[in-house]
Image (cartoon, rainbow, N blue to C red):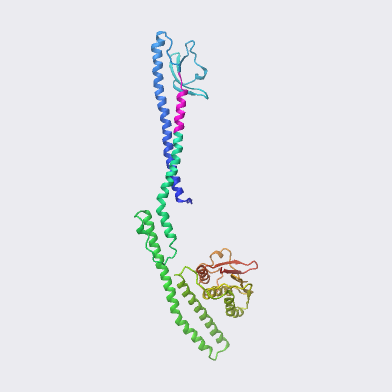
Amino acid sequence: MTSKQPLVRRIVIAFTLMTLVVSGGFSLGIVAIVHFIEEHLVTQEMNEELENILQKDLAQGLAPRLDDKTRLFASHMPGYEIPKSFIGLDEGFNEVVTDTEAYYVYIRDLPQQRYLLVQEQAEFEARENALFMTVFAGFLLSGLAAWLLGWLMARTIIAPLVRLAQQVRHRDQLLTLAPNLAPEYPADEVGHLAAAFDETLGQLRNSLERERFFTSDVSHELRTPLMVVASSAELLETSALDERQRRQVNRIKRATAEINDLVETFLLLARANTQPNPLDGNTTLEQVAREQAERWAPRFAEKGLTFDLNIEANSATALHAGFISTVMSNLLRNALHYTDSGVVRLLINANSFRVEDTGQGVPSAQQHEIFEPFVRGTEARGEGLGLGLSLVKRICAHQRWQVSMYSLPAGGSCFEVTVI
């Protein structure tokens, strides 16, 4: 699983752990060496001393000459009986430590005889413990020093990354021709990252520029044929037409008006892509709702649906007429396509509006992706490509409106747009 710890913390932890492992190994090495040297030197010294006692003192019938901290015990010598605490020890060097006493015991076995040379080593044991405590304190201090040094080194190491992240974060206007970042950094990993960002940002700029030009050019070129279609429909309307032909002419006029509105919206979006701030407006939700109701009510009636416009509260917020009309129109068209019977409601509040229907609804598994491009419901209607709700989302994102949808308890869907 990928760690989610900050990079500084991960560097500090790694540096501290490495130091603790090295210093811990060094400390254990000191302890092992002390024990090895202690056993080797003491064994050699006590062996020489016992040999001198046997050869120079006992061999001549003299009492062993010992210092205050050394004693001799023998299995066959009266007055030198081996204490119970030393019985059972192996031949050679032994270390006997109790809660209050500490001894070095050197044992030599001869035929039918056992000699024990015992030295009190409480003072040496105290010094040894002091040495071990010093080593342990050094181990702890090295860990603390490693943490502080690791923190300082980590801050120094990632400073270029922090700087690069701040520069990248502040480049929210992708189409602005800002200078490249790579020349500001050395040719190391951070410089390569900055160069990769410059390259990716350049590709993204080109892609957005091509999209903007494409949208603008296509929208501009569509105006001429739309004018031809609209004028031709007007001429046909003045002719003697039967009822069926007149309905077809009206369909052509409505489709032409819708396409013209979409062209205007696309042109607005193409221009708005160069401006991060929402566009100002001069209309209200109530005005746009009444215009859309007048436009869509006949189409709902043709399908046998009831259309209700409810002004629950008046809104004085000035909105961009083209954008709010496109959003509301797309949501009403969506309700028309996916509602076979019942009611479609347009409800206006002070800072929002809702489009409710009694249609088939959207499964909960698809509600989170219904605003994505080219996504249509499981029972798609009409000849659309699934771009209407995507256009709604794009407009709302640019104008900083909030759009959401949810299922109604009685069935159907509700799309809500909040303009503040």
- Tell me the chief SS of the magenta region: helix
At a point 63% along the width and 67% down the height, the residue shown is 408
Q: Return the residue found at the far top.
A: 61
Residue 414 is left or right of residue 112, and the answer is right
Quarter of the image where one finds residue 115: top left
Q: Return the residue found at the far right.
A: 410
Q: How many marks?
A: 0
Q: Is residue 248 part of the magenta span, yes or no?
A: no
Seen in the picture, residue 310 relative to 164 is either above or below; the reply is: below
Across and down, in percent, residue 94 comes to 45, 22
Give the quadrant of the C terminus: bottom right
At a point 48% along the width and 77% down the height, the residue shown is 264
At a point 43% along the width and 57% down the height, the residue shown is 165
Residue 301 is left or right of residue 394, and the answer is right
At a point 41% along the width and 57% down the height, the residue shown is 164
Across and down, in percent, residue 234 comes to 51, 87
Across and down, in percent, residue 210 comes to 41, 70
Give 235 or 278, whichever is nearer the viewer. Answer: 278
Give 180 or 293, whichever is nearer the viewer. Answer: 180
Across and down, in percent, residue 343 comes to 63, 74
Q: Is residue 121 part of the magenta span, yes or no?
A: yes
Give 406 or 241, whichever is nearer the viewer. Answer: 406
Specify the segment rendered in magenta.
118-134
